[in-house]
Image (tube, rainbow, N blue to C red):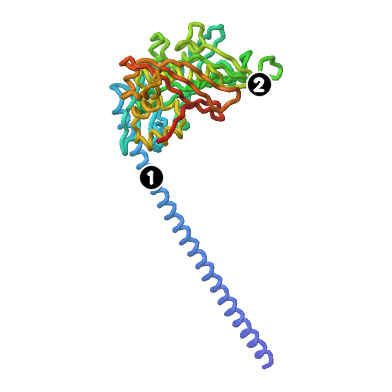
């Protein structure tokens, strides 16, 4: 009897243990099942999100491609027949704050044909071609060698284009010398609808006398630098060049022979013995200094007079202090350029009996520089013009110039 009770107790304990273990196993299985289902649900949601993102990316890519196709069709429609877009460079070229003006490198036919240059300005949703110059670049991958007047040669490498601060930079790498390059700085002049060459920069460690040169055609100055420690040449010096501005790109290329009328030959022609656009004649050299001289003032005045005599009235505003133009020309006179200039160029008759104000700039027959006065290290200068009108009247004008920290000259006058 006692054995039966013991066996029964063992069976009860075993049954209870089995029940507990089985129940625990079921709980664990349910928990695992719930975790598995949760992970599956998460994977499904992630897959759905990934699919949605992929679909959105594909849709965005399709829209971008459609916009690009429309743009390319629009730009190609602006070009002559059989001429297509080879490369596009975007940026603000006319100072209207739009960053989508477009420089177009064009090509005609196959890659063996010369390339051209066109400017298209953004007008709302559309583009307007405002300037074009075909055949001004060699074909792609044409690395023709050129030789300077002294016999030294260079070979054009890859050309690159960029827009910085409203200016088009055309840069070349010298394929014959490591770490050598040169570039042209161009500016689109809205008023005259022209591309103007305003700067040139070069760098070449293989040259005997200098490593870099930088020309500002607006100020007629060239800065030469030499970084070689063993060289006896001054490390940095300025040269003043005899240049008549503006350098209209189309007029400039007209001076070339047809076979050399392209950018790649500019470097050789620029420093040739035959001269280039009046020859970049060095008329003064200033080591370690760039102090304004009478010659600088005379050149500034001559270039200003050239603008007046040739009717380039808007262009002449570049010779005035920007703040003076803004206050007197833009605000006080409401942009009336003729009135601004006639009032500025008014003065006393040679007899001193009357004050003469030309009615129109075109009434001015001649302007002569009679006197220039500047003290060494001064920040101001005075100039006296003698002006003769088409009526025969003569009078003198006393003008004032300011010299800024960069030694740039500007006319300025009274406001009101």
On-image quarter of the C terminus: top left
Q: Quadrant of residue 76?
A: top left
Closer to the camera in the image, 155 or 385: 385
Closer to the camera in the image, 148 or 5: 148
Mark 1 and mark 2: Cα distance apart in space: 51 Å
Q: Is residue 199 visible?
A: no
Task: Give residue 148's position: percent from left, percent from top.
Answer: 53, 9
Task: Give residue 37's position: percent from left, percent from top.
Answer: 48, 64
Q: Quadrant of residue 137?
A: top left
Name the residue carrying label 2: 227
Q: Is residue 351 visible?
A: yes
Q: Is residue 125 left or right of residue 163?
A: left
Q: Is residue 131 left or right of residue 198?
A: left
Q: Quadrant of residue 379?
A: top right
Closer to the camera in the image, 69 or 35: 69
Residue drawn at x 57%, y 80% is: 19
**Tag 1 and tag 2, C-beta contact below 8 Å:** no
Residue drawn at x 39%, y 28% is: 103
Task: Give residue 54's position: percent from left, percent from top.
Answer: 41, 48
On-image quarter of the N terminus: bottom right
Q: Which mark is residue 95?
A: none
Closer to the camera in the image, 148 or 221: 221
Q: Secondary structure at mark 2?
A: loop
Residue drawn at x 40%, y 14% is: 253
**Does label 1 or label 2 sit earlier along the sequence?**
1
In the rendered view, would you say 352 is above or below 123? above
Q: Secondary structure at mark 1?
A: helix
Query: In the orientation shown, which residue stands out farthest toward the right?
Result: 230
Q: How dense is the environment of label 2, judged by Cα within 10 Å: few (below 14), some, or many (20 and up)?
A: some
Name the residue carrying label 1: 60
Task: Give residue 238's position: percent from left, percent from top.
Answer: 59, 19
Q: How dense is the environment of label 1, judged by Cα within 10 Å: few (below 14), some, or many (20 and up)?
A: few
């Amino acid at each position: 009897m006692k054995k039966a009770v013991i066996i029964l107790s063992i069976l009860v304990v075993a049954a209870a243990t089995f029940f507990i273990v089985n129940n625990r196993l079921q709980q664990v299985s349910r928990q695992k099942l719930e975790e598995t289902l949760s992970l599956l649900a998460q994977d499904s949601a992630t897959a759905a999100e990934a699919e949605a993102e992929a679909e959105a990316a594909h849709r965005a890519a399709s829209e971008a491609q459609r916009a690009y196709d429309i743009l390319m069709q629009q730009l190609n429609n602006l070009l002559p027949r059989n001429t297509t877009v080879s490369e596009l460079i975007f940026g603000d070229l006319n100072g209207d704050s739009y960053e989508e003006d477009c420089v177009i490198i064009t090509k005609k036919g196959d890659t063996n044909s010369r390339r051209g240059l066109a400017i298209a300005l953004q007008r709302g949703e559309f583009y307007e071609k405002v300037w074009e110059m075909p055949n001004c670049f060699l074909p792609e991958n044409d690395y023709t060698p050129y030789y300077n007047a002294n016999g030294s040669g260079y070979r054009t490498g890859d050309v690159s284009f960029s827009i910085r601060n409203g200016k088009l930079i055309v840069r070349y790498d010298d394929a014959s010398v490591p770490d050598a390059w040169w570039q042209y700085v161009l500016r689109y002049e809205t008023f005259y609808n022209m591309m103007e060459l305003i700067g040139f920069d070069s760098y070449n460690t293989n040259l005997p006398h200098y490593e870099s040169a930088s020309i500002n055609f607006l100020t007629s100055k060239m800065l030469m630098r030499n970084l070689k420690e063993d060289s006896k040449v001054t490390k940095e010096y300025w040269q003043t060049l005899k240049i008549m501005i503006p350098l209209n790109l189309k007029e400039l290329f007209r001076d070339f022979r047809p076979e050399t009328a392209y950018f790649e030959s500019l470097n050789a022609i620029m420093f040739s013995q035959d001269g280039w656009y009046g020859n970049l004649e060095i008329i003064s050299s200033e080591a370690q200094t760039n102090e304004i001289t009478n010659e600088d003032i005379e050149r500034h005045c001559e270039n200003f007079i050239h603008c007046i005599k040739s009717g380039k009235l808007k262009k002449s505003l570049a010779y005035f202090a920007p703040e003076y133009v803004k206050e007197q020309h833009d605000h006080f006179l409401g942009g009336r350029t003729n009135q601004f200039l006639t009032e500025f160029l008014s003065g006393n008759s040679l007899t001193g009996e009357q004050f003469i104000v030309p009615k129109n700039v075109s009434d001015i027959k001649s302007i002569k520089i009679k006197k220039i006065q500047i003290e060494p290290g001064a920040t101001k200068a005075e100039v006296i013009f003698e002006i003769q009108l088409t009526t025969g009247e003569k009078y003198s004008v006393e003008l004032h110039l300011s010299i800024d920290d960069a030694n740039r000259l500007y006319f300025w006058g009274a406001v009101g």
